[in-house]
Amino acid sequence: MRTAYNTAQLENNYWQREAQDAMKKGIIDQPFYDRVKELYPSYFYSPNIFIRIGLFLLSTMVMFMATGFLYLLTGSFEHNNYLGVLIIMAIGSYALLEFLVKNNQHYNSGVDTLLLCAIVICSHVVIFWKTRSDNPIDYLLLAAIAFYLTLRFTDALMGIVAGAYVMLAIVQILLPLLMQQNYIVFDMMIIALASLLYWGVKKFEIRNTNYLYNKSYEWAGIFLLFAMYCGGNLLLSPIILSPFHLRHLKFMQSGDSFNLGNSWNLLLWIWMFAMPVVLLYLGIKQKNRTNFRMGIITIVLSVLTFKYFFHIMQTSHALMLFGGLLIVLCYWVINYLKNDRNGLTSKDIDKEQGKFMNLENLFIAEQFGVAEPIPEQGPTFGGGHSDGGGASGDI
Amino acid sequence: MDIRLFEKLQEDGHLSEESVAQVRARIESRPFSLHWELKTMLYLGITLFTTGVGMFIYENINTIGHLTIIILLGIAAIAGFIYAYKKHGGYSTQKVESSGIAYDYVVLLSAMLMVSCIGYLQFQYHFFGSGWNLASIIPALLLLVCAYYYDHLGVLSMAITNMAACIGIVLSPMHFFDLNNLNNDMTIVAMFLFGLVLMSISYLSVMRDVKAHFAFTYKNFGFHLLFISLISAMVKFEEIYLLLFLVFAVAAYLQYKLAIQERSSYFFVFMTIYGYIAMSYTFLKLLFSIVGNDGNIGMAYFASLFEMATAVLAIVTIINTLKKLRHEDSL
């Protein structure tokens, strides 16, 4: 399929980004980077993250106002004709997107991201407003729309959305298994199908020679890895199934998860802890940051799931124990890897510290620095009449 | 980083085979950095541990005793500061390079423990008397001293948020747009003045070249406080909203010029968004006060169109101005 962009420009854009990455990592210097920009020119409008956020927010404002204006103009409030307005908005967004790409070369500018989101959201509401059912065909239709947008605009976010709709369609198809309480078959099928899709995405990624869809492949892969993990997580899968009103069925299975004597349940627990370890191992072995980070995230989720089902100690003790262990472990690893060992280091060799430093401080202010203001009438301390930190009944 | 970039350059005749081989060897010999992952896990560890300690103290307050807890918190904070003091190269008005990730987090943890210790002391024993202001300004000042001595931006952010708390403002990225905060006359005035003070400190830091790298942190908090308080004031003090808009316009113009001078896309974009909000509000309020808005559907049409047009104008302004500044630096 033809993309909305000039293919040569897209490729040049990719080379420029790779050269910028190489410069940040100290592989090439500024003059080399400038030469790459000269050799492979790209005229896309692709601003930095702050501008992107600003443009996204303002475009959202325009979109809301345009929808409101259209409702007023068509008298939809009086005639309950919401669908017509949404269809016009979806088609209008698509037309505007094509126009902006063709004439203004918008590429991940924030405005195009908003328009893509608007197309999917309007389509979703239109399809589900009409049918009000959980038909897998509806999800596949939406997946097809998102997939088309991925191909046409080489957009990674739409790749994830398409993957999510495919997974939702699969869940819909497999729901009878859940109704019949074949939980394990259901979980195994989810894991197997997510793995199959992941394998397919990776195959395409390797064969990919024109670099147009690199980001889409990468993010679709991350999404499917997460879907594989969630399929075997006894806490996350019921939460994800909540919109289908089947949470209680999955929790019935979770209730049985204490019974580790059940070999099928045991298999899921093994999957839940083995997958993060494998991801961490592969991340380090292949120097693959995505796998390594996914390994960290999933291992934290596995520990939380374990804590949810097995109350082996009080929450405060568990927090102190795991927090303390994490601090000691990190301290040890930081010191151990001060000098490079086995190709690993704890030093910031990517020279990206400046880029994240200020964001990091905002995070600190949020996490640790939020102090409650002084009340105007002065403080009124004390809660309850007994000792025990205000633990009496009249607090 | 894709090695195919260098292969492509070779294919196109811009790089020799030897150069590509050298680059490949360099990429392959590069160690795999776990810097940011370890930092994130350390954050997580500190958050879990301090939350756990807090819960543990709450659950066992009768058994442990208040004084024991205060002493333990104090000892832990002092121990942390002594460790950091030994590792630290001494005070300088310039940026002092950190001694490592562990050092940064020890300073951060000690600062948190110090604040908890002083807060506990006041809560339990009214150490600083019944005036709560003194008890909240002291940790803020101590944090400020620590931030300057140990050259720690994270502790500086904590100091600023604590100082804001002294004058009744909840200051955190997640609370910036909390409208409940903005429903109090005094809070709005305090936010405005505190924002001005922070902006001035930021300016002076650069002018006097004293910890100039702290300037962004001061300015970031000050900028948002100043403009959010001005917009809130326009809504809250309806009688003088035109005068307040004038103050907003002057501040916005100065900030706009500064953002262009500093080539700061971050401040420019947020300035445009705040400007859009203030202008839309003022114009529509003025219009409704002249024409009236009793069931006038024409005005609703006009308001929607006006908001749309000004938002599009704001988008075009951002794109064109930053293009002129050649600030599309993501490429």
Image (cartoon, coloured by chain):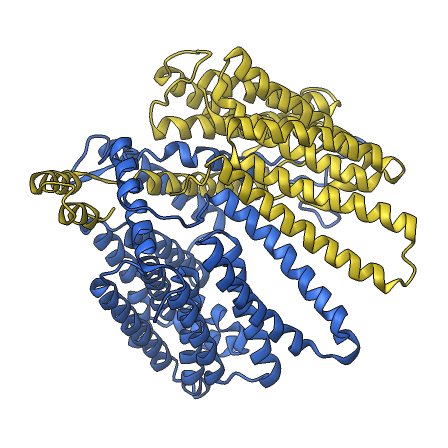
Residue occupying image coordinates x 54% and y 63%:
A96
Q: Give left or right: position of A124 versus A13.
A: right
Depth check: B57 or A84 in front? A84
Location of residue A90 in the rendering, given as x and y in whole percent from the top left corner = 57, 71
Which residue is at the front of the view, A144 or B287?
Answer: B287
| Picture quadrant of residue A23 | top left
Residue A285 is situated, as x and y percent measured from the top left of the image, at 18, 50
Residue A5 picture location, percent across and down:
39, 60
Image spot of residue B115 (x, y percent): 57, 27
Quarter placement of the N terminus of chain A: bottom left
Question: Measuring 72% from the left and 23% from the top, which residue is drawn there?
Answer: B133
Q: Nearer the viewer, residue B236 or B128?
A: B236
Image side of residue B2 versus residue A172, left or right: left
The hue in which chain B appears in the rendered picture of the protein: yellow
- How many labels, in total? 0
Asked if residue A336 lies left or right of residue A121, the reply is left
